[in-house]
Structures are given as C-alpha cells and as structure tokens.
Amino acid sequence: MNVSFEQIDAVNGLLTVELKREDFASDVNKGVAQMGVRHPIKGFRPGKAPKSLLMKFYGASVTADVIDRMVGRAVYDYIRDNKLQVLGEPLPNEDTKVDIMKDEEMTFKYDLGMAPAVELKLNKRINVPYYTIEVTDQMVDDAIAHDRKRLGTLVDGEVSDKESMLRGSMIELDEQGNDKQDGIKVERTVISPRYMTDDDEAAKFVGVKVGDTFVFNPHKANGGNIAELAAMLNVDRKDADVKSDFRVTIEEIKVNQEAEMNEEFFKGVLGTETEVKDEAAFRQAVRELIERANVPESNYRFTIDAQRILTDKAGELPLPEEFLKRFLKLRREQDEKNNGEVTDEEAQNMFKQLRWQLVKDHIAQELGIQVEKEDIDNAAFIFAQQQLSQYGIYNAPEDLIRQQADRFMQDERAREAIQEHAIDNKFYAAVKEAVKVNEKTVSVEDFRKLYEQEEKK
C-alpha cells in the first residue's frame, strides 16, 4: 500500500491511496471464514462450507468492509503523522472508480480542504473597545421602586389598581345576561388584573371598590387558559372551558403597600450580612449591584468587537469554499429531513464562523491558553449566580450558589454550556491582557445602538 499527498492550491489537497489485492487478501480470507462460522450456509456445518461458496455469499461485503477500514485508517494516519491542517473530513474524489472484486490494483483518491495559515501576533497596538454601561440615578430609582413593590405587603385597600388582588363572588350568566339556571356559582375567588392577558377585561378590575358589581368574561380575560379558569371558577379542568360572561361582586381588595426604606428593607435587598444603615449608603450599594449586573453585557460586547477586530487583523483567510459546501451538503443528506441544499447565505455564515474559529484557535495556541477544572468551577459559580439574580436573588449566600452550580453541572446540556463559558472566559481574559483595551462609558441607549448599527450593516 502506498499513500501520497498533492497540494492542489493553497487550500485544496488530494490524498491518494494505492492498494494491491495482496495488501488485503489475507484479511478478506479471515473475514469470510469468520462469516462462515457465525452465519453458516444452509447444508453445511459452521465453518465447513467451501471457500468458493463462502466467497460467493460473503466475499463482496467482507472485501468492501476490509478495504474501507484499511483505506480509512491509512488516510487518517497520513493526515495525523504529517500534521496536515485540514477542514471538515476527507471526501472521496469523483474520479475514483474501482471494482473491488476484479481489480488487482486499486487507487482511491480523497479531496482535502486545507486550513489556511493564520499570521497574527497580539500586541498593544491592537485596540479593542470595552463599553461600560453608565448607571444613572433614574436606573437606581427604578430598581429601588421595583424592590419596594417586590418586598411590599398586601393591605386592605379602598380602590383597586392593576397590582391589586381582589376577592369576590361570581355567577354565570346566560346569553340574555340573566343568572343562568344551574350555572356556575363561585362564593369566593381570587382575581388579579395584573395576570390577565386581555387589557379590556383587566381594565374592568381597576378603580373598583368593595361592593361594586359588573360583568366580565373569564375565558377572554385569561386567554382561554384552562388552568387559570379552573382556579378562578373553582371547577375541575375538564369543566373549565367555559366561555360565558359572569357577574362578579367585589368583596375584598388587597393593595400592595411598598416596603419602607429601613434596615429590614436594606437587608431584604442586599442580604442579611449587609451593614448598610441609611438611604444614601443603600443607594450606593444598589448602584454597585446594577454595575455588577451589567458586567456580563459589557463582556459580551467585548467578545463581539474582539472577534471583528482580530479577524480583520488576521487578513483575508482563503478557504476551500467549494469543498466546504460539498462537505456540508453531504452531511445534510445523511439527515432524512434535509434535502442537503446549502444556500449562499448559509455558506457565507459558515465561512465567517470558520474564519473566526481558525483565528481563535491560533490565538489560543499562541497564548498557551489551557482551561483547568478551577476555570470550569468558576464559570459554573457565575452561571448559577446569574440564574439566581434573574429570580430577584441578588445576594444569595455562597453555599446556595455552589449548590445551584453543582446541580447545573449534573445536567449534560447545562454542563456543556458552562464548559463553553469557561473556555470563552479564559480566552477573552487572555486577549484583554494581550491587546490595548479602550474603556468607554456609555449610556444604555448608546450601548443598544451598537447592536442597531450592526443590524443596519
């Protein structure tokens, strides 16, 4: 067997494997004999059928398997031993025409997509912006107002608003607007306009007082949600798909009384460990919370700008575009749900992502970036902290965050996402050290415009 390589151009190569029948004949004979033992031919005991008959039954399939394994191993061994930088996988060349049962000498050709060399050295002459979102007094005010509502208490109210919780009795009406005979009657039910999906129905519960009576439609108010209807009408789910109007009488109104600005409230927002005692210190602490919450947004923006700038600095990287389109098409054809077609837009997106991956891999190698277990643990901790903050838990104890992180690491999809975060965190941290970072403080409006400008392009 002989393996040779020819560089067609900068990004395309041809790998040739030459085989003689003597290279694989003994393996074929062994394979055919084993088939005769495992799958005896009718009329013969296992392993006792004549070789000629075994070859007739199993020769073609065994020969194909043996050649496929031998050639495949030769191709990948050559690529590995010669350190060829390839993209995708070797694809059979269309000129390969072989009769495995007749030819004494066979030639198998494979097209290779070659990765272009990346020539890029990071240094302080490369400038990458880092945008810090300005935290305004209004943002602090809004956050405090939100927390005062969140940590407030329900008290009796005279007039309802959209945030109120109301209790009342309900009677189902017929098409004429009269009490429906044998209709649904609810003695006490809880109603909150805040969670209604229909604005017109929700508005009927705003500005009412105890004792007010009016007609509304629960089905419309809840968007036909069976679970919500069953709870409101106090019936089983199977009986809850009721589209009738109801007359409701308001019997109780509870309104949210915002939490007072005191130490109890400060601890509720900042955690029991806080030493904040006055409003000025509390506002500063909230400002710092918002600043920390904005850091992931700033970091993400940095990754976008770094990717764009570093790809540009690497220059135009030629790719084996026709090879890659063919590779993607063949991969898709293996999926019965896909016709294998590759649009120009999909191809361009693939080329863009691949060019960045080549640059990223080159930089990671140049900077000697390696991800350790500690990096993954830190990424899991941050991931868990961010998830908890989405539920309003901004100052969770460290042990709670670590428990949540451990749970995420038990889930395969979450674990893969965390590992990707760890790799990116280590990579972009190294990039920050290697280039010049231009820090800029911008308003949240200007920060959003950065994305809007990209969409226009």
Image: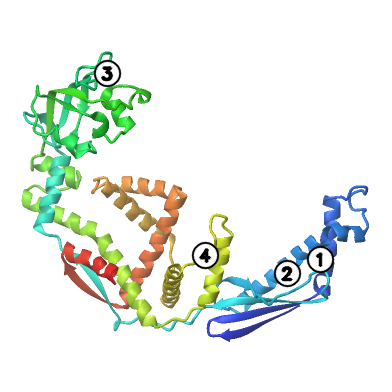
Residue 308 or residue 260, whichever sits in front: 308
Any part of residue 111 in sight: yes
Which numbered disc flags the more N-terminal residue, 4 or 2? 2
Q: Nearer the viewer, mark 4 or mark 1?
A: 4
Q: How far apart are marks 2 and 3 (CA)?
A: 77 Å
The amino acid beneath tag 4 is Glu
Which numbered disc flags the more N-terminal residue, 4 or 1? 1
Q: Is mark 3 on a helix, strand or loop?
A: loop
Residue 222 or residue 46, whichever sits in front: 222
Image quadrant assignment for residue 122? bottom left
Q: Distance between the residues labelled 4 and 1?
A: 39 Å
Which numbered disc flags the more N-terminal residue, 2 or 3? 2
Which numbered disc flags the more N-terminal residue, 2 or 1? 1
Mark sitting on residue 219: none
The amino acid beneath tag 2 is Met
Quadrant containing the N terminus is bottom right
Q: What element carries label 2?
A: helix
Mark sitting on residue 341: 4
| Residue highlighted by disc 2 | 70
| Mark 2–mark 1 CB contact (< 8 Å) | yes
The amino acid beneath tag 3 is Ile
Q: Is mark 1 on a helix, strand or loop?
A: helix
| Residue highlighted by disc 3 | 184
Label 4: how many residues lie within 10 Å, few (<14), some (14-19) or many (20+)?
Answer: some
